[in-house]
Amino acid sequence: MQWQHLYSSRRSGSSQKSSSGSQHIRTSFVRDYDRLIFSSAFRRLQNKTQVFPLPGAVFVHNRLTHSLEVSSVGRSLGKAIGDALADKYKDGDENFREFYKYELPSVIAAGCLAHDIGNPPFGHSGEDAIRIFFRELEGEAKKRFTGELSNNEQRDLTHFEGNANAFRTLTHSFGEERPGGFQLTYATLASIIKYPSDSDSGFNKEKLVTKKSGFFSTEINTYLQIAEELGIPRREPGKNVFARHPFVFLVEAADDICYRIIDFEDAHRLGIISIDNIAELFLAFFNNGQDYDSRSNVENTFKGIKDDNKKIQFLRARVINLLVHQLCGIFMKEEETLLSGILNEPLIDLLPTAMKQIIKAIDDYSYAHIYNHRSVVEIELAGYTVIGYLLKEFVYAILNPESMKSKKLLQLIPAQFPVSNENSLYSNLQSVTDYIAGMTDLYAVDLYHKMTGNRFSVSGL
């Protein structure tokens, strides 16, 4: 791969590159960011669980606020790397220098905004609920599922992946005549494909690119067009497994930084962990720091702040700043492996040993005290129950479309998710999954209550 070929203003659904001329106030890549911010799919993230249940008396992060913060960090990473590349390759043409000096921050920021846009309600348990439902099909449903769907199509559902669903959400037309979905630039779309593999080849943890999947069967051709345009090489002959685009590592790094810190901040607000626990873990990042980043300097400022929430905000800012600088240095150091497509670790796993040990301590503490906290487990169980029930009802309706109940159920599915006897079984199952995965937590629970009869909302009664 080559830096000068890894960006393009061509948009999904279009064969032409977008114009970035002076007649536009916003460049193509800034428009990507704006299209995401103003989209209903992005707004729905405000009612999708990040970790802790929503809503509550204490404000905690949801998928939307998390995505905005990741985008902020991603913009900083993009700015630092863009400046470094523009300065290193001074002989690059005007377009090269213009993109890396001024446009890369917008691309990474937009990629970060979109990185969770395909996640279903109830956090990662929502993904698991979809997978488990299709894996546990029985009888005639199982027979039709295995008989009418290809292996890759089956795995799209039995290994449902939020990353692949994000790519679908952004590029699929959902019944509209205008092709290309959000019509984002190829550069932005490439930046979110963490696992550039189809479902059949994915979910092999030996390689980073096949750890999960990045696109469903329906979006393979869209990804192939992006790979050809940007010069992304195929990693395995005869298979839909490609190298990671280098920009992906920056989007991933921003997410890796944010969720570790944000989850602790929310846990403190909920009284799950103490500020002393947070200080013990996060101040360790500065044990070997110098001057501004020395442990003594950071700790003295930390102790001088009276409000506990502001203390955590201070630590959050300092840790993010430190990790951004560290990961930018690693990115430039790994330039050769990034361009050759063989880097097999996220940037955060390449931190110096002492910092990796701190990251591991944070992860271990999170799993023990945050991700297994009772409130988190409860929302996960709710996800299994609600999503499992909705899938059961709607899939039953697809398989038995002539029954009166099925006809009523299918009327509930919006027209943008077409279900028809003329469609393949895979297409109909994907439409139902699109519908459910796009729901907010509140919408899914409300629909579940209405369909089970646990709660009625009838005007006048």
Image (cartoon, rainbow, N blue to C red):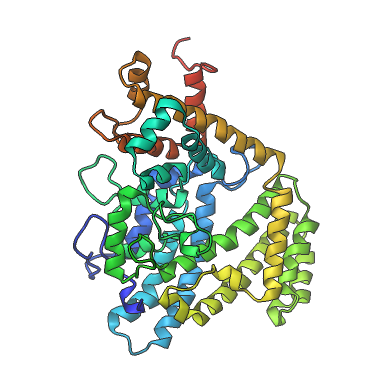
**Farthest-out residue, bottom:** 91
Image location of residue 73, percent across then percent down: 53, 65
Q: Decide: is 19 above or below 383.
A: below
Q: Nearer the viewer, residue 147 or 205?
A: 147
Image location of residue 109, percent across then percent down: 44, 63
Q: Decide: is 456 above or below 217.
A: above
Image location of residue 171, percent across then percent down: 31, 51
Image location of residue 299, percent across then percent down: 77, 70
**Farthest-out residue, top:** 461
**The N terminus: image quadrant:** bottom left
Image side of residue 10 versus residue 456, left or right:
left
Q: Nearer the viewer, residue 312 or 237?
A: 237
| Residue depicted at 35% across the width and 78% down the height | 2
Image side of residue 16 versus residue 131, left or right:
left
Image side of residue 62 versus residue 337, left or right:
right
Residue 30, by quadrant, is bottom left
Q: Decide: is 139 above or below 326.
A: above
Marks counted in the figure total: 0
Q: Is residue 305 visible?
A: no
Image side of residue 373 versus residue 10, left or right:
right
Q: Is residue 1 visible?
A: yes
